[in-house]
Image (cartoon, rainbow, N blue to C red):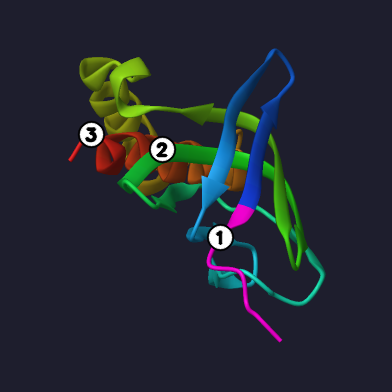
Amino acid sequence: MTVDKSFHLRIITPDRVFYEGEANMVEFNTTEGQIGVLPGHIPLTVIIKPGILYIYEPEGERRAALHAGFVEILPDQVTILAEIIEWPEEIDAERAAAALQRAQKRLESPTPETDIARAETALYRAMARIQALK
């Protein structure tokens, strides 16, 4: 029995095919924690939590800020249905820093109207954008 060293990765957003190609491994955050997927992984469906998506290709590593969506994992293919995902060159650093400050301020001094879950999600998204730029 031979084990493949790569699998087909497809990342789809509502408005485009963000990525399609062969990967040796992908890593990303889920609601259950961080996961790494290698070829031959057991079938699984997971919910994305904001963070960095690492794509390990035969040519090297790529990363993107992955914010929300679902992932279908099969032994020979991974499909990510992402609400929002951005390559580092698509991220506005100043805007991400301002969003981080706003979210931190909301969480440090909440009012009765503050939606804590929404503020936390905004914080995680801003942190992912900033991490993707590093």
Q: Which secondary structure dominates the residues rendered in magenta?
A: loop
Q: Amino acid at mark 1?
A: Ser
Q: Residues within 10 Å of mark 1 (few under 14, many from 20)?
A: many
What SS does tag 3 mark?
loop
Residue highlighted by disc 1: 6
Please determine whether, in this image, residue 20 is positioned above or below residue 77. above
Task: Name the front one of labels 1 and 3.
Answer: 1
Q: Residue furthest front?
A: 1
Query: Left or right: where does residue 64 sit relative to residue 35?
Result: left
Query: Which circle marks residue 64 in the picture?
Result: 2
Q: Report, in whole angstroms, how far the alpha carbon at label 1 lies from the one at label 3.
A: 26 Å
Q: Are marks 1 and 3 in contact (CB under 8 Å)?
A: no
- Residue drawn at x 66%, y 39% is 10
- Residue drawn at x 43%, y 38% is 65
Q: Report, in whole angstroms, how far the alpha carbon at label 2 lies from the one at label 1.
A: 19 Å
Q: Is residue 98 in view from this perspective?
A: yes
Residue 2 percent coordinates (x, y): 65, 80
Query: Left or right: where does residue 78 sit relative to residue 33?
Result: right
- Residue drawn at x 51%, y 40% is 66
Q: Residues within 10 Å of mark 2 (few under 14, many from 20)?
A: many
Query: Which circle marks residue 70 in the picture?
Result: none
Q: Amino acid at mark 3?
A: Leu
Which comes sooner in the sequence, label 2 or label 1? 1
Please determine whether, in this image, residue 97 is positioned above or below residue 79. above
Observer-nearest residue: 7 or 88?
7
Residue highlighted by disc 3: 133
Q: Report, in whole angstroms, how far the alpha carbon at label 2 lies from the one at label 3.
A: 9 Å
Query: Left or right: where does residue 34 sit relative to residue 7?
Result: left
Please determine whether, in this image, residue 94 is positioned above or below residue 85. above
